[in-house]
Amino acid sequence: MRDELADVLKGHNADYVEIRLEESQITRIIYRGERLEEVGTTSSVGGNVRALVKDGWGFVSFNHADKLRDKVELAIKQARLVGKEDSKFSQIEPVVDIVIAKTKRNPTTVPLASKKQLLDEYNDIILSTPKIQTSNIGYHDSRRKITFANSEGTYIEQNKLDLNLRLTAIATEDGQVQQIGLSLGSQGDFSAIEGLQDQVREMAQRAVRLLSAPHAKGGEYTVVLDPVLAGVFAHEAFGHLSESDFVYENQRLCDIMVLGRRFGDEHLNIVDGAAVPGLRGSYKYDDEGVPAAKTYLIREGILESRLHSRETAAKMGEMPTGNARALNYVFPPIVRMTNTFIEPGSVSLEDMLSDIKEGIYAKDWYGGTTSLEMFTFSAAEAYMIRNGKLAELLRPVVLSGNVFVTLNNINAIGNDLQMSQGGGCGKGQQVPLPVSNGSPHIRIRRCLIGGG
Ligand SMILES: [Zn+2]
Protein backbone atom coordinates (compact mmCIF):
# COMPACT_ATOMS: atom_id res chain seq x y z
CA MET A 1 0.00 0.00 0.00
CA ARG A 2 2.80 2.40 0.91
CA ASP A 3 4.52 2.04 -2.48
CA GLU A 4 1.21 2.27 -4.32
CA LEU A 5 0.28 5.55 -2.62
CA ALA A 6 3.80 6.96 -3.00
CA ASP A 7 3.57 6.24 -6.70
CA VAL A 8 0.16 7.93 -7.06
CA LEU A 9 1.47 11.01 -5.20
CA LYS A 10 4.50 11.41 -7.47
CA GLY A 11 5.00 13.91 -10.29
CA HIS A 12 2.17 16.42 -9.78
CA ASN A 13 2.35 20.17 -10.17
CA ALA A 14 1.05 21.07 -6.69
CA ASP A 15 2.53 22.52 -3.49
CA TYR A 16 1.18 19.64 -1.39
CA VAL A 17 -1.05 16.58 -1.84
CA GLU A 18 -2.36 14.05 0.69
CA ILE A 19 -4.47 10.89 0.51
CA ARG A 20 -6.45 9.53 3.46
CA LEU A 21 -8.11 6.12 3.21
CA GLU A 22 -10.47 4.80 5.88
CA GLU A 23 -12.12 1.49 6.74
CA SER A 24 -14.55 1.58 9.63
CA GLN A 25 -17.02 -0.55 11.52
CA ILE A 26 -19.58 1.12 13.79
CA THR A 27 -22.05 -0.55 16.14
CA ARG A 28 -25.05 1.42 17.40
CA ILE A 29 -27.73 0.50 19.92
CA ILE A 30 -30.45 3.07 20.69
CA TYR A 31 -33.47 2.79 22.99
CA ARG A 32 -36.30 5.20 23.63
CA GLY A 33 -38.07 3.87 26.69
CA GLU A 34 -38.74 0.18 26.15
CA ARG A 35 -38.51 0.54 22.39
CA LEU A 36 -35.29 -0.59 20.76
CA GLU A 37 -34.95 1.99 17.97
CA GLU A 38 -31.71 0.88 16.39
CA VAL A 39 -29.37 -2.06 16.71
CA GLY A 40 -26.69 -3.13 14.29
CA THR A 41 -23.24 -2.82 12.86
CA THR A 42 -22.35 -0.97 9.68
CA SER A 43 -19.10 -1.09 7.77
CA SER A 44 -17.86 1.58 5.44
CA VAL A 45 -14.90 2.19 3.19
CA GLY A 46 -13.85 5.50 1.66
CA GLY A 47 -11.20 8.10 1.32
CA ASN A 48 -10.25 11.54 0.14
CA VAL A 49 -7.56 13.54 -1.58
CA ARG A 50 -6.64 17.06 -0.52
CA ALA A 51 -4.37 19.25 -2.63
CA LEU A 52 -2.81 22.68 -2.10
CA VAL A 53 -1.86 24.94 -5.01
CA LYS A 54 -0.91 28.59 -4.50
CA ASP A 55 -2.71 28.68 -1.12
CA GLY A 56 -5.96 27.27 -2.57
CA TRP A 57 -7.35 23.90 -1.47
CA GLY A 58 -9.01 21.19 -3.54
CA PHE A 59 -10.80 18.31 -1.80
CA VAL A 60 -12.28 15.16 -3.33
CA SER A 61 -13.89 12.39 -1.26
CA PHE A 62 -14.92 8.98 -2.59
CA ASN A 63 -16.15 5.50 -1.67
CA HIS A 64 -14.07 3.55 -4.16
CA ALA A 65 -10.32 3.91 -4.04
CA ASP A 66 -9.78 2.97 -7.70
CA LYS A 67 -8.21 5.37 -10.24
CA LEU A 68 -6.58 7.29 -7.37
CA ARG A 69 -4.34 9.18 -9.77
CA ASP A 70 -7.40 10.72 -11.48
CA LYS A 71 -8.76 11.77 -8.06
CA VAL A 72 -5.47 13.43 -7.21
CA GLU A 73 -5.54 15.31 -10.52
CA LEU A 74 -9.15 16.41 -9.87
CA ALA A 75 -8.26 17.78 -6.40
CA ILE A 76 -5.28 19.65 -7.88
CA LYS A 77 -7.48 21.09 -10.63
CA GLN A 78 -9.95 22.35 -8.02
CA ALA A 79 -7.13 23.85 -5.96
CA ARG A 80 -5.73 25.63 -8.99
CA LEU A 81 -9.11 27.35 -9.53
CA VAL A 82 -9.01 29.02 -6.10
CA GLY A 83 -5.26 29.41 -5.50
CA LYS A 84 -3.88 32.94 -6.00
CA GLU A 85 -0.86 33.50 -3.75
CA ASP A 86 2.06 31.69 -2.10
CA SER A 87 0.93 28.64 -0.11
CA LYS A 88 1.17 28.96 3.66
CA PHE A 89 1.65 25.52 5.20
CA SER A 90 3.99 24.68 8.11
CA GLN A 91 6.91 22.37 7.44
CA ILE A 92 7.07 19.13 9.40
CA GLU A 93 9.36 16.09 9.27
CA PRO A 94 7.99 13.21 7.17
CA VAL A 95 7.01 10.15 9.24
CA VAL A 96 6.58 6.46 8.44
CA ASP A 97 4.71 4.56 11.15
CA ILE A 98 2.06 1.94 11.92
CA VAL A 99 -0.01 2.49 15.07
CA ILE A 100 -1.89 -0.42 16.62
CA ALA A 101 -4.91 0.24 18.91
CA LYS A 102 -4.34 -1.09 22.42
CA THR A 103 -7.20 -1.75 24.79
CA LYS A 104 -8.21 -3.92 27.75
CA ARG A 105 -11.52 -5.24 26.39
CA ASN A 106 -11.97 -4.52 22.70
CA PRO A 107 -15.68 -3.82 22.06
CA THR A 108 -15.48 -5.32 18.56
CA THR A 109 -14.81 -8.72 20.19
CA VAL A 110 -17.93 -8.47 22.43
CA PRO A 111 -20.95 -10.10 20.73
CA LEU A 112 -23.80 -7.73 19.82
CA ALA A 113 -26.19 -9.87 21.93
CA SER A 114 -24.02 -9.33 25.04
CA LYS A 115 -23.95 -5.57 24.46
CA LYS A 116 -27.73 -5.53 24.10
CA GLN A 117 -28.17 -7.67 27.22
CA LEU A 118 -26.11 -5.23 29.31
CA LEU A 119 -28.09 -2.23 28.05
CA ASP A 120 -31.39 -4.09 28.59
CA GLU A 121 -30.37 -4.56 32.19
CA TYR A 122 -29.61 -0.83 32.66
CA ASN A 123 -32.84 0.12 30.90
CA ASP A 124 -34.85 -2.20 33.19
CA ILE A 125 -33.25 -0.60 36.26
CA ILE A 126 -34.25 2.88 35.05
CA LEU A 127 -37.77 1.96 33.92
CA SER A 128 -38.61 -0.01 37.07
CA THR A 129 -37.85 2.99 39.32
CA PRO A 130 -41.15 4.46 40.63
CA LYS A 131 -42.13 7.84 38.99
CA ILE A 132 -39.73 7.26 36.09
CA GLN A 133 -41.71 7.83 32.93
CA THR A 134 -39.18 6.89 30.30
CA SER A 135 -35.52 6.48 29.37
CA ASN A 136 -33.10 7.21 26.56
CA ILE A 137 -30.06 5.09 25.85
CA GLY A 138 -27.52 5.64 23.09
CA TYR A 139 -24.53 3.32 22.71
CA HIS A 140 -21.90 3.38 20.03
CA ASP A 141 -18.55 1.75 19.44
CA SER A 142 -16.26 2.04 16.47
CA ARG A 143 -13.12 0.61 14.96
CA ARG A 144 -11.29 2.56 12.27
CA LYS A 145 -8.20 1.98 10.22
CA ILE A 146 -6.88 5.17 8.66
CA THR A 147 -4.11 5.14 6.10
CA PHE A 148 -2.50 8.51 5.40
CA ALA A 149 0.13 9.40 2.84
CA ASN A 150 1.34 12.74 1.53
CA SER A 151 3.59 14.17 -1.16
CA GLU A 152 6.32 14.86 1.43
CA GLY A 153 6.93 11.14 2.02
CA THR A 154 4.79 10.60 5.13
CA TYR A 155 3.00 7.24 5.38
CA ILE A 156 1.01 6.44 8.54
CA GLU A 157 -1.45 3.67 9.33
CA GLN A 158 -3.46 4.27 12.50
CA ASN A 159 -5.93 1.88 14.09
CA LYS A 160 -8.42 3.56 16.41
CA LEU A 161 -11.12 2.35 18.77
CA ASP A 162 -13.83 4.43 20.42
CA LEU A 163 -16.81 3.78 22.67
CA ASN A 164 -19.55 6.01 24.03
CA LEU A 165 -22.66 5.47 26.15
CA ARG A 166 -25.34 7.91 27.29
CA LEU A 167 -28.15 6.90 29.61
CA THR A 168 -31.00 9.26 30.58
CA ALA A 169 -33.75 8.77 33.15
CA ILE A 170 -36.87 10.98 32.82
CA ALA A 171 -39.14 11.37 35.85
CA THR A 172 -42.59 12.94 35.88
CA GLU A 173 -45.20 13.87 38.48
CA ASP A 174 -48.16 16.28 38.35
CA GLY A 175 -47.13 17.59 34.94
CA GLN A 176 -43.54 18.24 36.00
CA VAL A 177 -40.63 16.64 34.19
CA GLN A 178 -37.06 16.20 35.46
CA GLN A 179 -34.21 14.23 33.95
CA ILE A 180 -30.71 13.10 34.77
CA GLY A 181 -28.17 11.68 32.34
CA LEU A 182 -24.99 9.66 32.63
CA SER A 183 -22.33 9.92 29.90
CA LEU A 184 -19.42 7.53 29.70
CA GLY A 185 -16.84 6.63 27.14
CA SER A 186 -13.42 5.15 26.57
CA GLN A 187 -10.84 4.69 23.91
CA GLY A 188 -12.44 1.38 23.03
CA ASP A 189 -12.42 -0.37 26.41
CA PHE A 190 -15.78 -2.09 26.85
CA SER A 191 -15.18 -2.63 30.59
CA ALA A 192 -15.63 1.16 31.07
CA ILE A 193 -19.39 0.65 30.75
CA GLU A 194 -19.74 -2.66 32.63
CA GLY A 195 -20.89 -2.96 36.25
CA LEU A 196 -22.77 0.35 36.34
CA GLN A 197 -25.94 -1.10 37.91
CA ASP A 198 -25.64 0.88 41.17
CA GLN A 199 -24.77 4.11 39.37
CA VAL A 200 -27.73 3.72 37.01
CA ARG A 201 -30.14 3.02 39.90
CA GLU A 202 -28.83 6.04 41.80
CA MET A 203 -29.19 8.21 38.67
CA ALA A 204 -32.86 7.23 38.22
CA GLN A 205 -33.61 7.86 41.89
CA ARG A 206 -31.95 11.27 41.67
CA ALA A 207 -34.17 12.24 38.71
CA VAL A 208 -37.17 11.41 40.93
CA ARG A 209 -35.78 13.40 43.87
CA LEU A 210 -35.50 16.45 41.62
CA LEU A 211 -39.29 16.51 41.26
CA SER A 212 -39.64 17.72 44.84
CA ALA A 213 -36.45 19.83 45.00
CA PRO A 214 -36.75 23.63 45.37
CA HIS A 215 -35.49 26.17 42.81
CA ALA A 216 -32.39 28.18 43.60
CA LYS A 217 -32.97 31.87 44.15
CA GLY A 218 -31.32 33.68 41.22
CA GLY A 219 -28.34 35.94 41.88
CA GLU A 220 -24.58 36.08 42.28
CA TYR A 221 -23.04 33.33 44.36
CA THR A 222 -19.71 31.76 45.12
CA VAL A 223 -20.04 28.56 43.11
CA VAL A 224 -18.11 25.31 43.28
CA LEU A 225 -18.10 23.34 40.03
CA ASP A 226 -17.55 19.58 40.07
CA PRO A 227 -14.92 18.08 37.73
CA VAL A 228 -17.51 17.26 35.03
CA LEU A 229 -19.01 20.75 34.77
CA ALA A 230 -15.61 22.46 35.16
CA GLY A 231 -14.25 20.23 32.38
CA VAL A 232 -17.13 21.19 30.09
CA PHE A 233 -16.47 24.85 30.96
CA ALA A 234 -12.79 24.40 29.96
CA HIS A 235 -13.82 22.83 26.63
CA GLU A 236 -16.95 24.77 25.65
CA ALA A 237 -16.36 28.23 27.07
CA PHE A 238 -12.59 28.48 26.65
CA GLY A 239 -11.27 25.64 24.45
CA HIS A 240 -13.23 26.54 21.32
CA LEU A 241 -11.83 30.09 21.53
CA SER A 242 -8.33 28.54 21.35
CA GLU A 243 -9.01 26.93 17.96
CA SER A 244 -6.86 29.02 15.65
CA ASP A 245 -9.04 28.87 12.54
CA PHE A 246 -11.71 30.58 14.63
CA VAL A 247 -9.26 33.12 16.08
CA TYR A 248 -7.73 33.86 12.67
CA GLU A 249 -11.10 34.61 11.10
CA ASN A 250 -12.43 36.72 13.97
CA GLN A 251 -10.77 40.10 14.53
CA ARG A 252 -12.48 40.66 17.88
CA LEU A 253 -11.19 37.33 19.17
CA CYS A 254 -7.73 38.09 17.74
CA ASP A 255 -7.71 41.29 19.80
CA ILE A 256 -8.69 39.41 22.97
CA MET A 257 -6.64 36.21 22.64
CA VAL A 258 -3.24 37.89 22.68
CA LEU A 259 -0.45 35.49 23.67
CA GLY A 260 1.19 36.60 26.90
CA ARG A 261 -1.99 38.18 28.26
CA ARG A 262 -3.10 37.29 31.80
CA PHE A 263 -6.44 35.47 32.11
CA GLY A 264 -6.32 34.07 35.63
CA ASP A 265 -4.19 33.72 38.73
CA GLU A 266 -0.88 31.81 38.82
CA HIS A 267 -2.56 28.53 39.82
CA LEU A 268 -4.56 28.32 36.59
CA ASN A 269 -3.24 25.94 33.92
CA ILE A 270 -5.42 24.81 30.99
CA VAL A 271 -4.06 22.14 28.67
CA ASP A 272 -5.12 20.39 25.46
CA GLY A 273 -3.28 17.34 24.26
CA ALA A 274 -3.76 14.19 22.23
CA ALA A 275 -0.36 13.04 23.57
CA VAL A 276 -1.96 12.54 27.00
CA PRO A 277 -2.44 8.75 26.66
CA GLY A 278 -5.49 6.49 26.96
CA LEU A 279 -8.27 9.05 26.60
CA ARG A 280 -10.92 9.39 23.89
CA GLY A 281 -9.15 12.38 22.37
CA SER A 282 -5.74 10.65 22.35
CA TYR A 283 -3.83 9.68 19.20
CA LYS A 284 -0.26 9.48 17.94
CA TYR A 285 -0.67 11.59 14.77
CA ASP A 286 -3.38 14.01 13.72
CA ASP A 287 -5.08 13.85 10.31
CA GLU A 288 -2.26 15.83 8.69
CA GLY A 289 0.37 13.41 10.01
CA VAL A 290 1.59 15.87 12.67
CA PRO A 291 2.70 14.15 15.91
CA ALA A 292 0.33 14.70 18.85
CA ALA A 293 1.44 17.21 21.47
CA LYS A 294 0.46 18.52 24.88
CA THR A 295 -0.23 22.23 24.56
CA TYR A 296 -0.49 24.67 27.44
CA LEU A 297 -3.27 27.06 26.42
CA ILE A 298 -2.98 28.88 29.75
CA ARG A 299 0.13 28.41 31.93
CA GLU A 300 0.22 29.98 35.38
CA GLY A 301 -2.62 32.27 34.38
CA ILE A 302 -1.02 33.54 31.15
CA LEU A 303 -2.27 32.75 27.61
CA GLU A 304 0.63 30.72 26.22
CA SER A 305 -0.51 29.13 22.98
CA ARG A 306 -3.44 27.91 20.88
CA LEU A 307 -4.42 24.95 18.78
CA HIS A 308 -3.20 24.67 15.20
CA SER A 309 -3.33 22.83 11.94
CA ARG A 310 -0.36 23.17 9.59
CA GLU A 311 -2.24 25.88 7.72
CA THR A 312 -3.26 28.03 10.71
CA ALA A 313 0.22 27.66 12.25
CA ALA A 314 1.85 29.01 9.08
CA LYS A 315 -0.69 31.82 8.72
CA MET A 316 -0.25 32.98 12.32
CA GLY A 317 3.51 32.42 12.47
CA GLU A 318 3.25 29.81 15.23
CA MET A 319 4.11 26.08 15.54
CA PRO A 320 1.73 23.26 14.52
CA THR A 321 0.25 21.47 17.56
CA GLY A 322 -1.17 18.28 16.02
CA ASN A 323 -4.82 19.39 16.29
CA ALA A 324 -6.00 18.94 12.67
CA ARG A 325 -8.78 16.35 12.85
CA ALA A 326 -11.47 15.07 10.51
CA LEU A 327 -14.63 13.30 11.67
CA ASN A 328 -14.23 10.79 8.83
CA TYR A 329 -13.11 10.54 5.20
CA VAL A 330 -15.99 12.72 3.97
CA PHE A 331 -14.44 15.81 5.58
CA PRO A 332 -11.11 17.65 5.39
CA PRO A 333 -9.30 18.07 8.71
CA ILE A 334 -10.00 21.25 10.70
CA VAL A 335 -8.60 22.54 14.01
CA ARG A 336 -10.13 20.57 16.88
CA MET A 337 -9.58 19.96 20.57
CA THR A 338 -8.47 16.54 21.88
CA ASN A 339 -8.26 16.09 25.68
CA THR A 340 -8.85 19.47 27.30
CA PHE A 341 -8.43 19.98 31.02
CA ILE A 342 -7.68 22.26 33.91
CA GLU A 343 -4.61 20.93 35.73
CA PRO A 344 -5.04 20.06 39.41
CA GLY A 345 -4.01 22.40 42.22
CA SER A 346 -3.70 21.64 45.90
CA VAL A 347 -7.05 22.47 47.56
CA SER A 348 -9.33 19.71 48.87
CA LEU A 349 -13.08 19.94 48.22
CA GLU A 350 -13.67 20.17 51.96
CA ASP A 351 -11.39 23.21 52.27
CA MET A 352 -12.93 24.77 49.18
CA LEU A 353 -16.40 24.57 50.76
CA SER A 354 -15.35 25.44 54.28
CA ASP A 355 -15.22 29.24 53.93
CA ILE A 356 -18.43 29.60 51.90
CA LYS A 357 -21.30 30.92 54.03
CA GLU A 358 -23.94 30.64 51.32
CA GLY A 359 -23.10 29.32 47.87
CA ILE A 360 -23.98 26.75 45.24
CA TYR A 361 -22.39 23.43 44.34
CA ALA A 362 -23.10 22.78 40.63
CA LYS A 363 -22.52 19.33 39.19
CA ASP A 364 -22.59 17.68 35.81
CA TRP A 365 -23.61 19.21 32.53
CA TYR A 366 -27.06 19.20 31.02
CA GLY A 367 -26.69 21.58 28.07
CA GLY A 368 -25.74 25.08 27.14
CA THR A 369 -24.76 27.60 24.52
CA THR A 370 -21.82 29.89 23.92
CA SER A 371 -21.57 33.03 21.85
CA LEU A 372 -17.97 34.18 21.55
CA GLU A 373 -16.94 34.90 25.15
CA MET A 374 -20.43 34.64 26.65
CA PHE A 375 -21.67 31.30 27.96
CA THR A 376 -24.85 29.86 29.44
CA PHE A 377 -24.63 26.35 30.92
CA SER A 378 -27.18 24.21 32.69
CA ALA A 379 -25.83 22.12 35.53
CA ALA A 380 -27.70 18.84 35.82
CA GLU A 381 -27.47 18.73 39.58
CA ALA A 382 -27.05 21.41 42.21
CA TYR A 383 -26.92 21.78 45.98
CA MET A 384 -26.90 24.76 48.31
CA ILE A 385 -23.72 25.27 50.29
CA ARG A 386 -24.50 26.58 53.77
CA ASN A 387 -21.93 27.44 56.43
CA GLY A 388 -19.18 25.51 54.71
CA LYS A 389 -21.18 22.33 54.14
CA LEU A 390 -23.28 20.82 51.33
CA ALA A 391 -26.99 21.33 52.07
CA GLU A 392 -30.27 20.71 50.21
CA LEU A 393 -30.63 19.40 46.63
CA LEU A 394 -31.84 22.07 44.17
CA ARG A 395 -33.52 21.97 40.78
CA PRO A 396 -30.93 22.21 37.99
CA VAL A 397 -29.41 25.71 37.83
CA VAL A 398 -28.21 27.84 34.92
CA LEU A 399 -24.80 29.50 35.12
CA SER A 400 -23.97 32.35 32.79
CA GLY A 401 -21.23 34.87 32.29
CA ASN A 402 -18.23 36.04 30.36
CA VAL A 403 -15.52 33.35 30.11
CA PHE A 404 -12.63 35.77 30.68
CA VAL A 405 -14.25 37.36 33.75
CA THR A 406 -15.05 33.86 35.04
CA LEU A 407 -11.48 32.56 34.53
CA ASN A 408 -10.28 35.56 36.48
CA ASN A 409 -12.80 34.83 39.25
CA ILE A 410 -11.55 31.26 39.85
CA ASN A 411 -10.12 31.47 43.36
CA ALA A 412 -9.50 27.82 44.26
CA ILE A 413 -8.38 24.83 42.18
CA GLY A 414 -8.87 21.36 43.63
CA ASN A 415 -6.45 18.47 43.92
CA ASP A 416 -8.88 15.94 42.41
CA LEU A 417 -8.57 15.96 38.59
CA GLN A 418 -11.10 13.71 36.86
CA MET A 419 -11.49 13.25 33.12
CA SER A 420 -14.95 12.86 31.55
CA GLN A 421 -15.07 10.72 28.47
CA GLY A 422 -18.74 10.83 27.47
CA GLY A 423 -20.28 12.77 24.62
CA GLY A 424 -18.44 14.30 21.70
CA CYS A 425 -17.54 17.65 20.23
CA GLY A 426 -19.33 19.40 17.37
CA LYS A 427 -17.90 21.94 14.96
CA GLY A 428 -19.47 22.72 11.61
CA GLN A 429 -20.98 19.49 10.34
CA GLN A 430 -18.29 17.36 11.98
CA VAL A 431 -20.08 15.91 15.02
CA PRO A 432 -19.63 13.95 17.29
CA LEU A 433 -15.84 13.89 17.39
CA PRO A 434 -14.29 11.83 20.23
CA VAL A 435 -12.79 14.16 22.85
CA SER A 436 -12.42 14.15 26.60
CA ASN A 437 -12.36 17.00 29.06
CA GLY A 438 -11.72 17.33 32.73
CA SER A 439 -10.83 19.37 35.74
CA PRO A 440 -10.54 19.15 39.48
CA HIS A 441 -13.24 20.90 41.54
CA ILE A 442 -12.93 24.66 41.08
CA ARG A 443 -14.39 27.58 43.01
CA ILE A 444 -15.61 30.72 41.24
CA ARG A 445 -16.57 33.89 43.04
CA ARG A 446 -19.40 36.14 41.83
CA CYS A 447 -20.95 33.65 39.41
CA LEU A 448 -24.42 34.48 38.06
CA ILE A 449 -26.99 31.76 38.77
CA GLY A 450 -30.49 31.55 37.34
CA GLY A 451 -33.15 29.10 38.48
CA GLY A 452 -33.61 26.02 36.26
ZN1 LIG B 1 -16.77 21.20 21.44
Image (tube, rainbow, N blue to C red):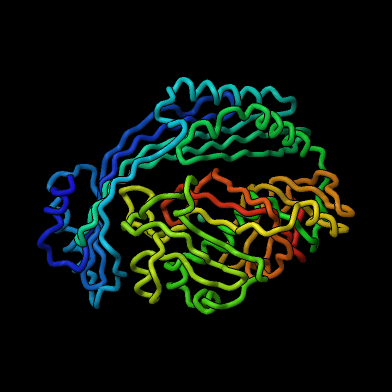
Q: Residue 206 occupies which quadrant of the picture?
A: top right
Position of 232 with respect to 216 (left or right) is left
Q: Nearer the viewer, residue 289 or 378?
A: 289
Q: Nearer the viewer, residue 278 or 162?
A: 278
Residue at left offset 28%, top offset 63%: 93
Residue 289 is situated, as x and y percent measured from the top left of the image, at 31, 57
Residue 214 is situated, as x and y percent measured from the top left of the image, at 83, 45
Q: Residue 82 occupies which quadrant of the picture?
A: bottom left
Task: Please say if 141 is above or below 404.
Answer: above
Task: Please say if 45 is above or below 359.
Answer: above
Indicate the quadrant containing the N terminus: top left, top right, bottom left or bottom right: top left
Residue 6 is situated, as x and y percent measured from the top left of the image, at 15, 53
Residue at left offset 38%, top offset 42%: 160
Position of 151 with respect to 108 (left or right) is left
Q: Nearer the viewer, residue 363 or 370?
A: 363
Task: Please say if 373 is above or below 289.
Answer: below
Residue 49 visible somewhere in the drawing = no
Position of 310 with respect to 163 (left or right) is left
